[in-house]
Amino acid sequence: MIANLRVIRTTFELDIKQQAVDLFMIFGVVIQPLLIAIMAIYMLLERDASRGIYVVVGSGMTGLWTSLLFRGTFNINAERFMGTLEGIVASPTSLASVVLGKTLASVSLSLLSMIFSYGLASVVFRLPLSIAQPAVFVASLLVTILAFISFGLLISPLMAVNLSLTGWVNALEYPMYILGGFLFPILLLPGWSNPFSYLLAPYWAARVLHAASSGTATPAEILLSWSMMLLLGALYIAASYRLFRIVLRRARVEATLSLM
Amino acid sequence: MKRLRNSLHIFLGGAVLSYKALFRWFRLEPYIATKIIAPLNQILFFTLLGTFATGPDTASFYAIGNAIQLTAMSGIYGVTMSIGGERNEGTLIYLFGSPANRLLTFLGRALVHVLDGMLGVVMGLIWAGLLLGVDYSRADLLALALTVFITTVSTCGLGLLMGCMSLLTVNVMFINNTIYFLLLVFSGANVPLANFPLWVQNAAHLLPLTRGIQAARLVIAGSRLAEVAPLLVGELLIGAAYVLIGYALFSWFEMTAKRRGTLEAF
């Protein structure tokens, strides 16, 4: 247990250092959410100037998802491409711990998206920003982090097991922005698509964070969103457990993990 | 005559080979994901965001803007990677060692991306019509085709300039991503230019796409070619300016790299 925690901490520290100087991540976590925020500010605030905090939360969510998607996709695959995967799976260290450390790093760093968007809206555009229910917002953000980490734990082995899925990574960015209701409510979407949203923890995260920031979060709403995030998070972890077993089987038994 | 034939061979052969090299690692599935599904997602996201902001009647504004902006996918990423790929794959040294006409070699890198970019825009316009109700019944299709062609050429001009940047830095994908999103924000694809401060509007008119998107919206709304001609001429001139700056940079890079022996050093 202690050894695993040490692995998680070490991987976290190393990955934070790597990501902090990775221009692709800097773009995904800082530049892209800021440019989306600028667009959303000009688009959404034209009619209603009180939507500033909505833009901050929504564009921050886009940064969280983009970072999780791209880092999650390459958490294991990058080790494969660099030839270090065999070393990791052959060591007594759990592969899941390594991926957990990396996911924790990307989720932590991507929280910067929201902070930068807040700074942009507040300092550059001088929008009046206030979080109506700060305690609920902070608590919801913590549950969101847990849900995103569990989603990341699902994405990494999934992309390692199905390499062809990595080709779809560019096409998976916007669907979550849409289905997650990050910058507009899913009521705009056709009814048949709503069940897909309900299966995504980021949707519940966006829903409760928007509600808490605008002051419309009722106890029932908060409870529902948190419960769904925790339930879906548990399901993602259960699925990722099976996928990690497949990854390890391919590495240790079939010796096919490095085959492209 | 023989010289002309050789030049044509360099231009066309180089164009096709650089495109093949760029997508050699691609299988059909990821190609569809990148060139068909991802653009559709972009159009849907920004159109839904736009209609949420300003009402359902404005869907065409966002759908057309984003469909035309898709040309930047080929024009910026494709062209840049075609030029930058020469260095990454170690073929730049042979290219600069050959007596081939530099201008044709340079322009040839963009040719297939112009066609690919136009195909991407057509696909985007079809999605916009099928899924978002954009009405083409009043559009002069020939004028629209010319608008798409000129806008794509002009965007590839910026791509050629960015491609030369890829010979100077390893961080070209960062620059490309930023340029692509800057075009998305400031070309008028999603935000009417009038909403921006005046200095931003002036800067936006130095970008490719800005006039092209305006022209496409007008043509689809029923304007005739003569009415949008000034916009198209402006778009073409902007593209030509980027090509000239890019070619000057390309020539300077070759000369400097040969003199200093830094052809493959970043």
Image (cartoon, coloured by chain):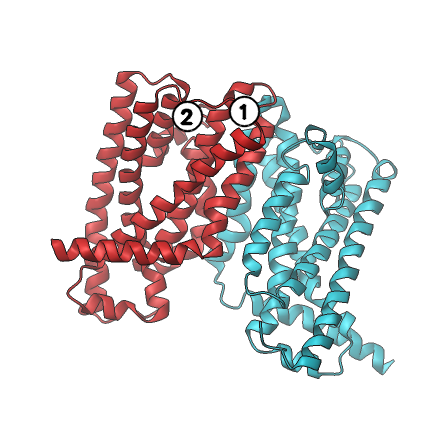
Question: In the rendered structure, are the residues bearing label 2 and label 1 in contact, judged by CB atoms less than 8 Å apart?
Answer: no
Disc nearest the viewer among 2 and 1 = 1
Answer left or right for A9 relative to B112.
left
The residue where tag 1 is placed is A127
Question: Could you tell which of marks 2 and 1 lies nearer the N-terminus?
Answer: 1
* Nearer the observer, B208 or A168: B208
* Badges 2 and 1, same chain: yes
Instruction: Say left or right for A204 vs B109.
Output: left
**Depth check: A51 or A192 in front?**
A51
Q: On the rendered image, what quadrant is the C terminus of chain B found in?
A: bottom right
Q: As drawn, which residue projects farthest toward the front?
A: A123
What's the residue at 42%, 41% (across, down)? A112
Q: Which residue is mark 2?
A: A191
Q: Is residue A199 visible?
A: no
| Chain B drawn colour | cyan
Q: Check disc 1: other Cα within 10 Å, few if <14, some if 14-19, many if 20+.
A: some
- Residue type at the position of mark 2: Gly
Answer above or below: position of B218 versus B14. above
- Which element type, helix, strand or loop, lies under badge 2? helix
Query: Label 2 marks which chain's residue?
Result: A
Give A14 or B99, whichever is nearer the viewer: A14
